[in-house]
Amino acid sequence: MKLKFANIRIPVSANPNPKNVLFQKYRIQSRDVQDFKILRQAIDARKKNRVVFDYQLMLELPDNYAHLLHEAGVSLLQEAAPVEYPEWTDPLRPVVVGFGPAGMFAALYLARCHARPVIIERGGKIEDRKRAVNQFMFDKQLDPNCNVQFGEGGAGTFSDGKLNTNVHSEYNAFVLQEFYKHGANEDVTYMQNPHVGTDYLEKVVRNMRLEIESLGGEFHFNTRFVDFEHQNDEVVLTCDPALTIKTHHLILGLGHSARDTIKMLYAKGLSMEAKPFSMGVRIEHQQRAINRMQYGEAARLLPPASYKGVVHLQDRSVYTFCMCPGGTVMASASEPGTIVTNGMSEHARAKANANSALLVNVTPEDFLVNGLLDGLDYQEKYERLAFEVTGDYRAPGNLVGEFLQGEIAEKYRSVKPSYPHGVVFCDLHRCLPDYVVDSLREALPLLDRKMPGFAHPDAVMTGVETRSSSPVRILRDENRMSATGIFPVGEGAGYAGGIMSAAIDGLKTAIFLLSQ
């Protein structure tokens, strides 16, 4: 029988093997253990003078240990149902546009069902994409089709690779296991806030592509989806460079930055709606200060700390998002003459600074003027203003101390900005809406009350963060379809908010196609 042991709490100062603690507590003989697995590991730092590891563990034991079922916190393990792979029978192959998390998991599932999916990706393979990103960081020469936003793996590849989600899905464990099988560290399967790291994500997405290819999948990199038409019950795609494909099942995993493609789809008659999104800055602290803030004296014994904060003002909410411990603020533009920031961490999270998006909610009422796609232009407007402020790909910013006083810093102090092209201190009203800047100024002292040190005067604010989510949702029906044979998925379609939720959305759509 498989038993689940919950709430095995171990003081951080002791840090012994959780397996040994479990054996001692329940008098389990190691020779009787047929299987052992960590289901969850969390750090409970609510009491700074007694920080503990909190484990959930699984053991497979003989039936003579049935008495443990009556012990507090012990139960039979309910394992997730396995994912099944029925045979694809449609004479036409499915087509997946975009190889970010939604497209990856849709294509992986379809390949295992012997559908031999065709994948269209406007950017390059991860190897080529990494070279293009490094080139931009070095000489500011931006490739508009292969960059931090576009290419194999999607925007999440050059991020922290966080796999935590608020989506409670029966497929959560499946997605985490697939990341592990394809090259992520095993701890992504059990950590409270799992992350892959950019360095490991490169390997993961490459290995997923190789499995899909081994099963007959066909990739077209550096290929842009530019048009489609319906011919009877078929969808006919036109791509650039010259490529025409017919399918009955077109999965659109576009990503939130494919503005040209979204505008094309709208012009072709796909139903859409404007949706809220957020704008703001990246805020950057010394990682050691965040460790002390979160863990107190136990910080020296623990991995780099993260945080999550939100305050609700009278008219707006301000919150942190995509927090990257020991990471870097990334230059993430996808159009020339724009500034976009994002955060990135490698698996070790070993850099000197912590960074997080600090965002203010934006509603359709803020940007709707001419039509429901106005949010796309609204984002781009402020990205271009940010570029105008600095005159190149340096980012506009300020220090928290001066920002709260309505002044402009002259030089950085204890926190050195990690943004690769450098930061130009300025009045952030020049590149963000007034309500965003005013909300940030009101929220910082309130966040500091919850997380003392968050509004440290030396903390660096780097703008502009505009791509946390799509300002448009492509509507779909109960069959996950937007128009005959067209299935929008993931962040770009407005149905996800991170790697996990996007992966699950793409997977669920692919599973649905095989259930019909």
Image (cartoon, rainbow, N blue to C red):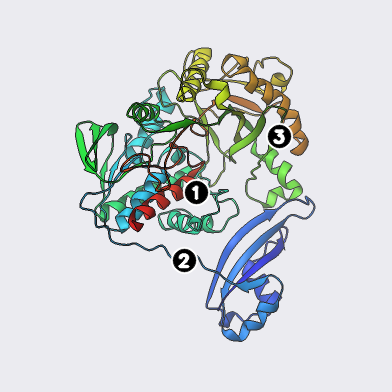
* Vertical comparison of 100 with 428: above or below: below
The one nearer the camera, 479 or 136, is: 479
Task: Give the amino acid type for the residue marked by disc 3 in the picture.
Answer: Val
Furthest residue in direction bottom, as rendered: 64
- From this viewpoint, is residue 461 visible? yes
Residues under numbered marks 2 and 1 in contact, where contact means CB atoms less than 8 Å apart: no
Q: Mark 1 points at which residue?
A: 196
Disc with the residue nearer the chain's start (3 vs 2): 2
C-alpha span from label 1 to label 3: 28 Å
Residue displayed at 39% across by 48% down? 479
Residue visible at 75% across and 32% down in the picture: 446
Label 3: which residue? Answer: 311
**Residue designated by label 2:** 81
The N terminus appears in which quarter of the rendering?
bottom right
Q: Which of marks 2 and 1 is nearer the N terminus?
A: 2
| Helix, strand or loop for disc 3 | strand
Callout 1: SS: loop
Left or right, residue 362 beside residue 375 = right
The residue that appears at 26% across and 50% down in the rendered structure is 217
The residues tagged by marks 2 and 1 sit, at their Cα atoms, a distance apart of 25 Å
